[in-house]
Amino acid sequence: MLENLLTIVFSTDFFASSIRLAAPLLLAAMGDVVSERSGVLNMGLDGMMLLGAFFGFVGAYFTGSVWLGVLCAMLSALILGIIHAFSCVTLGLNQVVTATGINMLALGLSSSLLRTFFGTSTNALRSVGFTPTKVPVLGDIPIIGKILFNQTILVYVALILVPLTYYVFFHTTWGLKIRAVGEHPRAAETMGVNVFKVRWIAVLYSSTMCGLAGAALSIAGLNTFIDNMSAGRGFIAFACIILGKFNPWGVAIGAVVFGLAEALQLRIQAVGLPIPYQFPIMFPYLLTLVVLFLSGVGLTPKAWGSPYLQDEE
């Protein structure tokens, strides 16, 4: 039995599955790292992903179009982003409390609307969804091609966002503004940077990407929706940002590690090792806690989590 597990783990299918499972985390984390670097603490990722997953499924289910499903997912999460930005950036409210409220709102709203739209029995619900698309030429590369270039479009988007986000952060004026606002907003304002505008855009982008991450959960493989589908992945994405020291490449490594852990727990359950099923399910989250404990927090933006008020002395 253990030999079967080792055979499965050291296979291209296992690593391809790990990348696919890491994609929602990458999408959410690549969006939220922009918000965090701008100084706005956004722990509402899980709620935004959950609502995005629900409306992504609903949109695809009723319209028969996977792209309209993606649009619905991004718009629904964007609404939560507007709430978070208005509360934290404009009003200067506590960012952790606001995010907690968003998570609770998304959990209750998605659960209630699921039963309103589909009744109490939702086991047979299926929508259209994304299917793997092989990249010409690259998909034929031995091993690497099967792992990276035979995935769904949303996985490709997640992978492309990693170098793109890094480039924007460290090689563009806009990235410099984001980092400046997160480090010293008053100094940035004296240089002509609109702090509120930068932070608003950062939060809205973060929420929109969380909606896309939610769509990656519901309509990029499973093509269905269940209660609490995000299952804490938003918090894991946030942990990846801390683990990655707010650097897109470090964040990507954290997301892939979690993807490997989640793929492993699925394989353990499939092989049927004689251990309670709760332990494999717990493994990815436990691994994340251990890695965070060993790595520490590291450097954070100096204005991280602090509201900016123009009338401050």
Image (cartoon, rainbow, N blue to C red):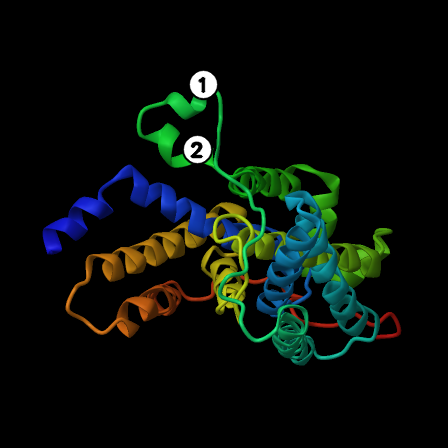
Residue 4 visible at all: yes
Q: Secondary structure at mark 2?
A: strand
Residue farthest top in this picture? 137
Q: Residue at x 26, y 62 (%)?
A: 269
Q: Which mark is residue 150?
A: 2
Quarter holding the N terminus?
A: bottom left
Quarter of the picture containing the C terminus is bottom right
Callout 1: SS? loop
In the image, residue 137 lies at what x, y percent? 45, 18
Q: Which one is nearer the viewer's eye here, 13 or 144?
A: 13
In primary-sequence order, the first of circles 1 and 2 is: 1
Looking at numbered disc 2 in the image, what kind of residue is underneath it? Answer: Asn
In the drawing, what numbered circle is on residue 114?
Answer: none
Task: Please state if 283 lies on the left or on the right of 171 as rendered.
Answer: left
Q: Which residue is mark 1?
A: 137
| Residue type, label 1 | Val
Q: Position of 4 compared to 145: left or right?
A: left
Q: Residue at x 52, y 58 (%)?
A: 241
Left or right side of 36 for 150: left
Q: Nearer the viewer, residue 66 or 191?
A: 66
Instruction: Give neighbour class at mark 2: few <14, some 14-19, many 20+ (Cα, 10 Å).
Output: many
Q: Percent position (x, y) of residue 29?
A: 56, 55
